[in-house]
């Protein structure tokens, strides 16, 4: 089946956006919490697979770890949960269809609650894997190293990688609406998850989960570094997710819709 046209994508985005904007507080908190702890599965899987492969294949282990992480993102999308930044495009499309600025409070509630509860869910569930013996010692070392490497980047590196990560994850929501089959949606989700773990992309919830789990496992990272990274990567995600992807795709869809009138 061929992908949807830009005006069809916009219509579907508005439908999905309306659903997300009109969620009850209980539903929003629940789906955001699920997304937060689901990300932990991907992070832990990355550490276990990379540690398993590294002794024999060296740097190829990073590719194997990224392949394992992609499964976590598939779980998240298949479960229709709310992940910060992934829920930019569709609600924004729905918002521009509402009169004036009436959608602003609903957008603010959606994004603030999603971000906060994603973080809570990830930090709480990561405690499970911080228990001694819960994961292999080799994986513990891998996860500590990833956390320290993430926390020690410069602010400009956080910002640049945050822009790239925000654009990538926001693009995912557009791509999911663009294709017609569930198989295509899950394949695209897996591809984005793989790229997110392997490439120079930072998503604030994923990066924060890496660092918090690393701290639980004994990484030498202070709360100041964690806070600075979270703030800078969040701004980068907003620039990349809203500025580069969401605005351009929403205006594209609006333009296509008007051309058909």
Image (cartoon, grey):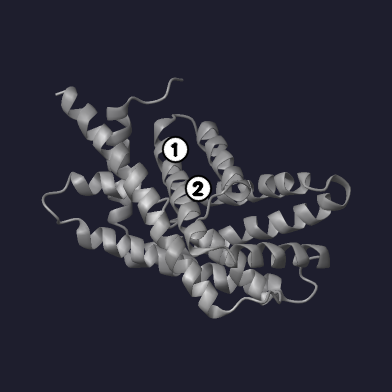
Quarter location, residue 47: bottom right
Q: Provide the residue designation for mark 2.
A: 77
Estimate the x, y position of residue 251 in percent, counting from the top left. 24, 37
Q: Provide the residue designation for mark 1.
A: 176
Residue 35 visible at all: no
Local SS, label 2:
helix
Residue ranking furthest to the left = 100
Q: Which residue appears at 71% of the width and 77% of the height?
A: 218
Residue 182, compared with residue 128, is above or below; it is above
Q: Which residue appears at 28% of the width and 62% of the height?
A: 108
Q: Are marks 2 and 1 in contact (CB under 8 Å)?
A: yes
Q: As drawn, is 58 to the left or to the right of 241? A: right
Estimate the x, y position of residue 244 in percent, counting from the top left. 35, 44
Quarter location, residue 45: bottom right
Q: As drawn, is 234 to the left or to the right of 193? A: left
Q: Quadrant of the C terminus?
A: top left
Residue 147, compared with residue 90, is above or below; it is below
| Mark identifier at residue 18 | none
Q: Earlier in the sequence, mark 2 or mark 1?
A: 2
Residue ranking furthest to the right = 56
What is the count of numbered marks? 2
Residue ranking furthest to the bottom = 223
């Amino acid at each position: 089946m061929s992908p949807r046209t830009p005006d069809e994508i916009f219509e579907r985005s508005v439908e999905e956006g309306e659903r997300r904007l009109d969620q009850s507080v209980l539903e929003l908190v629940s789906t955001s919490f699920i997304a937060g702890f689901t990300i932990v599965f991907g992070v832990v899987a990355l550490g276990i697979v990379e540690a398993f492969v590294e002794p024999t294949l060296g740097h190829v282990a990073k590719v194997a770890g990224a392949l394992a992480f992609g499964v976590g993102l598939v779980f998240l999308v298949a479960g229709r949960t709310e992940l910060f930044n992934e829920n930019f495009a569709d609600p924004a499309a729905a918002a521009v269809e509402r009169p004036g600025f009436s959608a602003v409070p609903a957008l603010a509630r959606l994004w603030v609650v999603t971000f906060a509860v994603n973080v809570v869910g990830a930090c709480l569930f990561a405690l499970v894997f911080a228990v001694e013996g819960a994961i292999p010692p080799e994986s513990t070392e891998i996860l500590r190293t990833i956390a320290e490497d993430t926390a020690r980047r410069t602010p400009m590196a956080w910002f640049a990688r945050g822009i790239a990560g925000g654009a990538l994850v926001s693009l995912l929501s557009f791509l999911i609406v663009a294709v017609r089959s569930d198989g295509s949606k899950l394949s695209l989700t897996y591809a984005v998850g793989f790229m997110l773990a392997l490439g120079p992309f930072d998503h604030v919830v994923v990066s924060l989960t890496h660092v918090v789990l690393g701290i639980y496992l004994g990484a030498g990272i202070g709360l100041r570094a964690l806070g600075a990274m979270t703030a800078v990567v969040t701004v980068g995600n907003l620039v990349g997710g809203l500025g580069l992807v969401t605005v351009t795709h929403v205006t594209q869809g609006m333009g296509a819709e008007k051309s058909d009138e």
